[in-house]
Amino acid sequence: MASSISNEVTHDFSILGLRVYKDGRVDRFKGTDIVPSSTNPETGVQSKDVVINPETGLSARLYIPRIPNPHRKLPLLVYFHGGGFCIETAFSPTYHNYINSLVAEANIVVVSVDYRRAPEHPLPTAYDDSWAAVKWVASHSTANGGEVWLKEYVDFDRVFFAGDSAGGNIAHNMAIRVGSDGLDGVKIVGMVLIHPYFGGKDPIGSEGDGAATDKFWLFVYPSSSGSDDPLFNPVVDPKFSSVVCDKVLVCVAEKDFLKDRGWYYKEELGRSGWEGVVEIMEVAGEDHVFHLIKPTCENAVALLKRVACFLNEDKA
Protein backbone atom coordinates (compact mmCIF):
# COMPACT_ATOMS: atom_id res chain seq x y z
CA MET A 1 0.00 0.00 0.00
CA ALA A 2 2.75 2.43 0.97
CA SER A 3 4.52 1.74 -2.31
CA SER A 4 1.44 2.50 -4.41
CA ILE A 5 0.78 5.72 -2.49
CA SER A 6 4.37 6.89 -2.92
CA ASN A 7 4.09 6.37 -6.66
CA GLU A 8 0.86 8.33 -7.00
CA VAL A 9 1.48 11.45 -9.08
CA THR A 10 -0.19 14.65 -7.88
CA HIS A 11 1.36 17.06 -10.38
CA ASP A 12 2.73 16.07 -13.76
CA PHE A 13 4.57 18.77 -15.65
CA SER A 14 6.65 16.39 -17.74
CA ILE A 15 6.78 18.87 -20.60
CA LEU A 16 8.75 21.15 -18.28
CA GLY A 17 10.75 18.31 -16.74
CA LEU A 18 9.02 17.95 -13.38
CA ARG A 19 6.79 15.42 -11.60
CA VAL A 20 5.54 15.54 -8.00
CA TYR A 21 4.27 12.55 -6.03
CA LYS A 22 1.72 12.27 -3.23
CA ASP A 23 4.43 11.59 -0.64
CA GLY A 24 6.12 14.88 -1.56
CA ARG A 25 8.86 13.36 -3.66
CA VAL A 26 9.93 15.49 -6.63
CA ASP A 27 11.46 14.14 -9.83
CA ARG A 28 13.32 16.55 -12.09
CA PHE A 29 14.12 15.21 -15.54
CA LYS A 30 16.35 18.05 -16.67
CA GLY A 31 18.35 20.94 -15.32
CA THR A 32 19.93 18.79 -12.62
CA ASP A 33 23.49 18.61 -13.99
CA ILE A 34 26.08 20.89 -12.42
CA VAL A 35 29.37 22.12 -13.85
CA PRO A 36 32.11 23.57 -11.66
CA SER A 37 33.19 27.18 -11.79
CA SER A 38 36.33 27.62 -13.85
CA THR A 39 38.41 29.73 -16.19
CA ASN A 40 37.17 29.18 -19.72
CA PRO A 41 40.18 28.46 -21.95
CA GLU A 42 38.53 29.95 -25.06
CA THR A 43 37.04 33.14 -23.67
CA GLY A 44 39.25 33.71 -20.64
CA VAL A 45 36.12 34.32 -18.56
CA GLN A 46 36.61 33.37 -14.91
CA SER A 47 33.85 32.19 -12.60
CA LYS A 48 33.56 31.30 -8.94
CA ASP A 49 30.80 30.40 -6.50
CA VAL A 50 29.84 32.31 -3.37
CA VAL A 51 27.44 31.58 -0.54
CA ILE A 52 25.33 34.64 0.19
CA ASN A 53 23.31 33.23 3.09
CA PRO A 54 24.55 30.04 4.77
CA GLU A 55 21.27 29.65 6.68
CA THR A 56 19.10 29.39 3.57
CA GLY A 57 21.74 28.12 1.16
CA LEU A 58 21.28 31.15 -1.11
CA SER A 59 24.29 31.32 -3.41
CA ALA A 60 25.47 32.70 -6.72
CA ARG A 61 28.03 32.17 -9.45
CA LEU A 62 30.16 35.23 -10.26
CA TYR A 63 31.80 35.89 -13.62
CA ILE A 64 34.46 38.35 -14.74
CA PRO A 65 35.87 38.79 -18.25
CA ARG A 66 39.44 38.12 -19.30
CA ILE A 67 41.97 40.10 -17.23
CA PRO A 68 39.71 42.96 -16.10
CA ASN A 69 41.41 46.26 -15.33
CA PRO A 70 40.60 47.36 -11.74
CA HIS A 71 41.03 50.98 -12.86
CA ARG A 72 38.27 50.61 -15.50
CA LYS A 73 35.08 49.60 -13.77
CA LEU A 74 32.62 47.43 -15.69
CA PRO A 75 28.82 47.18 -15.85
CA LEU A 76 27.28 44.59 -13.55
CA LEU A 77 24.46 42.27 -14.59
CA VAL A 78 22.45 40.48 -11.92
CA TYR A 79 20.99 37.46 -13.74
CA PHE A 80 18.05 35.28 -12.68
CA HIS A 81 17.83 31.88 -14.40
CA GLY A 82 14.62 30.44 -15.82
CA GLY A 83 13.02 27.02 -15.46
CA GLY A 84 9.51 27.77 -14.24
CA PHE A 85 10.79 28.54 -10.72
CA CYS A 86 11.24 24.74 -10.46
CA ILE A 87 14.13 23.43 -12.52
CA GLU A 88 17.65 24.49 -13.56
CA THR A 89 20.21 26.25 -11.35
CA ALA A 90 22.83 28.92 -11.75
CA PHE A 91 25.37 26.07 -11.91
CA SER A 92 23.83 24.04 -14.74
CA PRO A 93 25.70 23.69 -18.05
CA THR A 94 22.91 25.59 -19.82
CA TYR A 95 23.28 28.74 -17.75
CA HIS A 96 27.00 28.48 -17.11
CA ASN A 97 27.71 28.33 -20.84
CA TYR A 98 25.24 31.10 -21.71
CA ILE A 99 26.54 33.51 -19.08
CA ASN A 100 30.13 32.71 -20.04
CA SER A 101 29.37 33.69 -23.63
CA LEU A 102 27.53 36.84 -22.58
CA VAL A 103 30.36 37.99 -20.31
CA ALA A 104 32.88 37.48 -23.11
CA GLU A 105 30.72 39.31 -25.67
CA ALA A 106 29.65 42.24 -23.45
CA ASN A 107 32.76 42.60 -21.24
CA ILE A 108 30.71 42.78 -18.06
CA VAL A 109 30.64 41.30 -14.57
CA VAL A 110 27.74 38.94 -13.80
CA VAL A 111 26.18 37.68 -10.59
CA SER A 112 24.03 34.66 -11.51
CA VAL A 113 21.63 34.04 -8.62
CA ASP A 114 20.84 30.52 -7.42
CA TYR A 115 17.52 30.97 -5.60
CA ARG A 116 15.62 28.18 -3.89
CA ARG A 117 13.06 26.45 -6.12
CA ALA A 118 9.45 25.35 -5.98
CA PRO A 119 7.71 23.13 -5.09
CA GLU A 120 9.96 22.37 -2.09
CA HIS A 121 10.22 26.13 -1.57
CA PRO A 122 7.08 27.67 -3.11
CA LEU A 123 6.93 31.28 -4.11
CA PRO A 124 7.51 33.87 -2.79
CA THR A 125 10.78 32.16 -1.71
CA ALA A 126 12.48 32.75 -5.07
CA TYR A 127 11.56 36.45 -4.88
CA ASP A 128 12.81 36.73 -1.31
CA ASP A 129 16.07 34.99 -2.17
CA SER A 130 16.55 37.17 -5.23
CA TRP A 131 15.95 40.33 -3.22
CA ALA A 132 18.47 39.15 -0.62
CA ALA A 133 20.98 38.63 -3.44
CA VAL A 134 20.30 42.10 -4.87
CA LYS A 135 20.87 43.68 -1.45
CA TRP A 136 24.05 41.63 -1.03
CA VAL A 137 25.31 42.95 -4.37
CA ALA A 138 24.47 46.52 -3.33
CA SER A 139 26.41 46.12 -0.08
CA HIS A 140 29.61 46.07 -2.15
CA SER A 141 29.11 49.68 -3.24
CA THR A 142 30.36 50.61 0.24
CA ALA A 143 32.92 49.08 2.58
CA ASN A 144 30.39 46.52 3.86
CA GLY A 145 30.64 43.91 1.10
CA GLY A 146 33.47 41.41 1.18
CA GLU A 147 33.57 39.96 -2.34
CA VAL A 148 36.75 41.20 -4.02
CA TRP A 149 35.55 40.77 -7.61
CA LEU A 150 32.59 43.07 -7.00
CA LYS A 151 34.58 45.66 -5.09
CA GLU A 152 37.43 45.80 -7.60
CA TYR A 153 35.73 45.54 -10.97
CA VAL A 154 32.15 46.85 -10.76
CA ASP A 155 30.74 50.25 -11.62
CA PHE A 156 27.73 50.44 -9.32
CA ASP A 157 26.28 53.26 -11.38
CA ARG A 158 25.82 50.77 -14.26
CA VAL A 159 23.85 47.86 -12.84
CA PHE A 160 21.37 45.78 -14.85
CA PHE A 161 18.81 43.08 -14.08
CA ALA A 162 18.09 40.29 -16.56
CA GLY A 163 16.52 36.86 -16.78
CA ASP A 164 14.75 34.45 -19.07
CA SER A 165 11.27 32.96 -18.65
CA ALA A 166 10.63 32.73 -14.88
CA GLY A 167 13.89 34.61 -14.42
CA GLY A 168 12.50 37.45 -16.52
CA ASN A 169 9.53 37.55 -14.17
CA ILE A 170 11.92 37.77 -11.22
CA ALA A 171 13.99 40.50 -12.87
CA HIS A 172 10.91 42.68 -13.38
CA ASN A 173 9.77 42.16 -9.80
CA MET A 174 13.20 43.04 -8.47
CA ALA A 175 13.06 46.31 -10.43
CA ILE A 176 9.66 47.03 -8.89
CA ARG A 177 11.03 46.20 -5.44
CA VAL A 178 13.93 48.60 -5.85
CA GLY A 179 11.45 51.28 -6.92
CA SER A 180 9.34 50.80 -3.79
CA ASP A 181 11.97 49.89 -1.18
CA GLY A 182 15.07 51.66 -2.51
CA LEU A 183 18.59 50.34 -2.87
CA ASP A 184 21.40 52.53 -1.57
CA GLY A 185 24.63 52.86 -3.50
CA VAL A 186 23.39 51.33 -6.75
CA LYS A 187 21.99 52.75 -9.98
CA ILE A 188 19.82 50.31 -11.93
CA VAL A 189 20.32 51.45 -15.51
CA GLY A 190 18.40 48.83 -17.46
CA MET A 191 16.64 45.51 -17.58
CA VAL A 192 16.55 42.65 -20.12
CA LEU A 193 13.54 40.34 -20.13
CA ILE A 194 14.03 37.31 -22.39
CA HIS A 195 10.78 35.45 -23.10
CA PRO A 196 9.42 36.55 -19.69
CA TYR A 197 6.88 34.35 -17.92
CA PHE A 198 3.87 36.59 -17.27
CA GLY A 199 0.16 35.86 -17.44
CA GLY A 200 -3.22 37.18 -16.44
CA LYS A 201 -6.86 36.36 -15.83
CA ASP A 202 -7.82 37.44 -19.34
CA PRO A 203 -5.78 35.52 -21.96
CA ILE A 204 -4.36 37.45 -24.87
CA GLY A 205 -3.27 36.41 -28.36
CA SER A 206 -1.56 33.06 -28.56
CA GLU A 207 -2.24 32.06 -24.94
CA GLY A 208 -5.49 30.25 -25.75
CA ASP A 209 -7.71 29.98 -22.69
CA GLY A 210 -4.73 30.41 -20.34
CA ALA A 211 -5.74 27.42 -18.18
CA ALA A 212 -2.35 25.69 -18.29
CA THR A 213 -0.49 28.89 -17.44
CA ASP A 214 -2.83 29.64 -14.53
CA LYS A 215 -2.57 26.07 -13.20
CA PHE A 216 1.20 26.18 -13.18
CA TRP A 217 1.32 29.61 -11.51
CA LEU A 218 -0.85 28.34 -8.64
CA PHE A 219 1.34 25.24 -8.41
CA VAL A 220 4.49 27.28 -7.81
CA TYR A 221 2.65 29.88 -5.69
CA PRO A 222 -0.26 28.15 -3.89
CA SER A 223 -0.97 31.16 -1.67
CA SER A 224 -1.16 33.56 -4.62
CA SER A 225 -4.31 35.61 -5.14
CA GLY A 226 -4.53 34.09 -8.64
CA SER A 227 -3.49 34.82 -12.18
CA ASP A 228 -3.98 38.57 -11.73
CA ASP A 229 -1.49 38.62 -8.87
CA PRO A 230 0.74 41.62 -9.70
CA LEU A 231 3.77 39.33 -9.41
CA PHE A 232 2.40 37.38 -12.38
CA ASN A 233 0.42 40.03 -14.24
CA PRO A 234 2.57 43.14 -13.83
CA VAL A 235 0.36 45.51 -15.81
CA VAL A 236 -2.36 45.38 -13.10
CA ASP A 237 0.18 46.40 -10.46
CA PRO A 238 -0.44 50.00 -9.25
CA LYS A 239 3.36 50.25 -9.01
CA PHE A 240 3.92 49.15 -12.63
CA SER A 241 5.19 52.55 -13.73
CA SER A 242 7.77 52.60 -10.91
CA VAL A 243 10.09 50.15 -12.71
CA VAL A 244 13.40 51.54 -11.52
CA CYS A 245 15.57 51.82 -14.59
CA ASP A 246 16.04 54.05 -17.62
CA LYS A 247 15.59 51.43 -20.31
CA VAL A 248 14.13 47.98 -20.87
CA LEU A 249 14.72 45.42 -23.59
CA VAL A 250 12.00 42.79 -24.03
CA CYS A 251 12.96 39.78 -26.18
CA VAL A 252 10.28 37.51 -27.65
CA ALA A 253 10.21 34.61 -30.10
CA GLU A 254 7.67 34.17 -32.89
CA LYS A 255 6.61 30.63 -31.96
CA ASP A 256 6.65 31.12 -28.18
CA PHE A 257 3.17 31.06 -26.64
CA LEU A 258 4.38 33.84 -24.30
CA LYS A 259 5.19 36.13 -27.24
CA ASP A 260 2.00 38.19 -27.11
CA ARG A 261 2.32 38.64 -23.36
CA GLY A 262 5.81 40.06 -23.93
CA TRP A 263 4.45 42.50 -26.52
CA TYR A 264 1.64 43.43 -24.14
CA TYR A 265 4.15 44.16 -21.37
CA LYS A 266 6.17 46.36 -23.73
CA GLU A 267 3.16 48.33 -24.93
CA GLU A 268 1.63 48.81 -21.48
CA LEU A 269 4.94 49.86 -19.93
CA GLY A 270 5.28 52.49 -22.63
CA ARG A 271 1.79 53.80 -21.79
CA SER A 272 2.09 53.58 -18.02
CA GLY A 273 3.71 56.94 -17.35
CA TRP A 274 7.11 55.34 -16.78
CA GLU A 275 9.69 57.77 -18.15
CA GLY A 276 12.19 55.32 -19.61
CA VAL A 277 12.63 53.78 -23.05
CA VAL A 278 11.34 50.28 -23.78
CA GLU A 279 12.45 48.30 -26.85
CA ILE A 280 11.45 44.90 -28.14
CA MET A 281 13.25 42.31 -30.26
CA GLU A 282 11.22 39.55 -31.87
CA VAL A 283 13.07 36.62 -33.41
CA ALA A 284 11.30 34.93 -36.32
CA GLY A 285 10.80 31.18 -36.49
CA GLU A 286 11.96 30.41 -32.96
CA ASP A 287 10.37 29.03 -29.79
CA HIS A 288 10.70 29.60 -26.07
CA VAL A 289 14.32 29.99 -24.82
CA PHE A 290 15.67 28.72 -28.14
CA HIS A 291 18.91 30.61 -27.44
CA LEU A 292 19.64 28.27 -24.54
CA ILE A 293 18.67 25.11 -26.42
CA LYS A 294 20.74 25.85 -29.54
CA PRO A 295 23.13 28.63 -28.49
CA THR A 296 25.31 28.56 -31.61
CA CYS A 297 22.51 29.02 -34.16
CA GLU A 298 22.43 32.27 -36.13
CA ASN A 299 19.41 33.66 -34.28
CA ALA A 300 20.87 32.86 -30.87
CA VAL A 301 24.12 34.60 -31.75
CA ALA A 302 22.17 37.64 -32.96
CA LEU A 303 20.19 37.73 -29.71
CA LEU A 304 23.37 37.49 -27.64
CA LYS A 305 24.91 40.39 -29.55
CA ARG A 306 21.75 42.50 -29.13
CA VAL A 307 21.73 41.94 -25.38
CA ALA A 308 25.46 42.70 -25.16
CA CYS A 309 24.94 45.91 -27.12
CA PHE A 310 22.09 46.94 -24.84
CA LEU A 311 24.28 46.45 -21.77
CA ASN A 312 26.96 48.73 -23.20
CA GLU A 313 24.88 51.52 -24.72
CA ASP A 314 24.81 54.90 -23.04
CA LYS A 315 21.90 54.97 -20.68
CA ALA A 316 18.69 56.35 -22.12
Image (cartoon, rainbow, N blue to C red):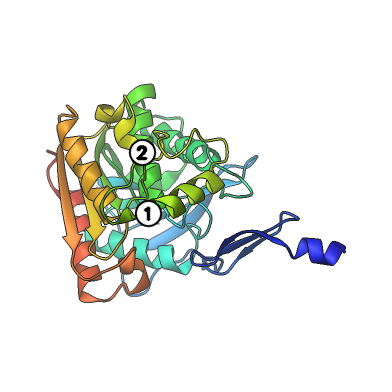
Q: Which residue occupies the foreground of this view, 104 or 11?
A: 11
Tell me which label, 1 or 2, sits earlier in the chain. 1
What amino acid type is highlighted by mark number 1?
Ser
Q: Which one is in front in this view, the residue at disc 1 or the one at disc 2?
A: 2
In this picture, residue 120 sits left or right of residue 290: right
Q: Residue at x 35, y 65 (%)?
A: 98
Q: Residues within 10 Å of mark 1 (few under 14, many from 20)?
A: many
Tag 1–tag 2 contact (CB < 8 Å): no
Label 2, on which residue? 233
Q: Which residue occupies the foreground of this view, 201 or 51?
A: 201
What amino acid type is highlighted by mark number 2?
Asn
Position of the C terminus, as image quadrant, is top left
Residue 114 in view:
no
Work out how far the residue at label 1 is from the one at label 2, CA to CA, in angstroms.
14 Å
Secondary structure of the residue carrying tag 1 is: loop
Q: Which residue occupies the foreground of this view, 20 or 126?
A: 20
Q: Residue at x 50, y 58 (%)?
A: 89
Which residue in the rendered view is the most extreme toward the front?
A: 209
Q: Quadrant of residue 233?
A: top left
Q: Is residue 274 above or below residue 117?
A: above
Position of the N terminus, as image quadrant, is bottom right
Q: Quadrant of residue 12?
A: bottom right
Image location (x, y in percent) of residue 133: 47, 40
Q: Is residue 128 above or below residue 166?
A: above
In this picture, residue 292 sits left or right of residue 86: left
Q: Which residue occupies the foreground of this view, 305 or 264?
A: 264
Residue 229 in view:
yes
In this picture, residue 14 sits left or right of residue 197: right
Secondary structure of the residue carrying tag 2 is: loop
Q: Is residue 263 above or below residue 6?
A: above
Label 1, on which residue? 165
